[in-house]
Every structure is written in structure tokens, then in C-alpha cells.
Image: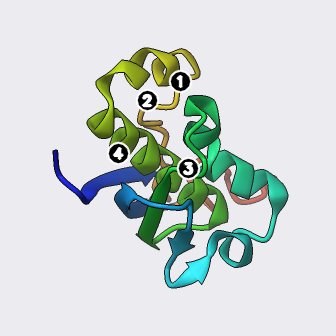
Amino acid sequence: MKEVIDTVGRRKTSVARVFMSPGKGRIVINKLPVEEYFKDEFKRSQALKPLVAAEKLNEFDIKVNVRGGGVTGQSGAVSLGIARALVEFDESIRALLRKDRLLTRDPRMVERKKYGRKKARKSFQFSKR
């Protein structure tokens, strides 16, 4: 068994590289403790959802490098990366995480802006005269 498991999680335009090793439960994201990086309680709980679901919150040291996107995309990317790392560590957790849809890559991306429009679909205000 590998001592350090590394996986990748993606969401929107964010990419999170997760390095997981057995330890005491220290979680560091971009060289900051998880409480400092995700100050919002909801985003933090979303990012750590796989660990809570698998009941392995204090069994692994996790180091994450995440870049791109905003806070929501980054927390989703971290969540997927942690879920994949847990499955790589213990295959029996797969069914548990699959049930909570934590192993599904969310395919939704921002639609590109079209020419002649204000945004992707919104038009400029129409003036009859």
C-alpha cells in the first residue's frame, strides 16, 4: 500500500490536487489550515463531507493544492479529490460515497459569452425607436 495517495478533483474551473497519508487529521489547503482557507462553515463542511460520511475525519493528514475558480468550485473540487483518495485507500467505502453522490464529477461549466449579446444568453435592451 502506498503511504501517500494523490488524486485530482475538479469542479467548474477549479482543480484540486489532494495528497492523503495516514495521520492525526491535519488538513492543510494551499498552506493554510482548512478553518482559515474555508472561513464559511458551509463551504468547509462541503469540502470535508467525504471524510464525515466515511467517519475517517481524524485518521488522515491531507494536503491540498487548489487553484482556479471561486470558493464554491474549490470546495467542490476538494470534496471530489478527498472522496477519490478515500476510495483509493479503501475500496469498501465506494458504495457509501456513491450513495451520497460524492464520487460524481459535476459536469456543469459556465457557458461562454456570445457575440452580439451582453452575456451568454442575455441580450442588450431592445429599443424600438
Q: Residues within 10 Å of mark 3 (few under 14, many from 20)?
A: many
Task: Choose the circle earlier in sequence order: 4 or 1.
Answer: 4
In the picture of the structure, the residue carrying the numbered disc 3 is: 76
| Residue 7: % across, % down | 29, 53
Gap in angstroms between the C-alphas marked 1 and 2: 6 Å
Q: Are marks 1 and 2 in contact (CB under 8 Å)?
A: yes
SS of the residue under disc 1: loop
The N terminus is located in which quarter?
top left
Drawn side of residue 96 relative to residue 91, left or right: right
Gap in angstroms between the C-alphas marked 4 and 1: 15 Å
Q: Are marks 1 and 3 in contact (CB under 8 Å)?
A: no
In the picture of the structure, the residue carrying the numbered disc 4 is: 85
Seen at 71% across and 59% down, the residue is 124
In the picture of the structure, the residue carrying the numbered disc 2 is: 104
Task: Choose the circle earlier in sequence order: 4 or 3.
Answer: 3
Q: On screen, 11 above or below 13?
A: above
Q: Which residue is at the front of the view, 26 or 36?
A: 26
| Residue 91: % across, % down | 30, 25
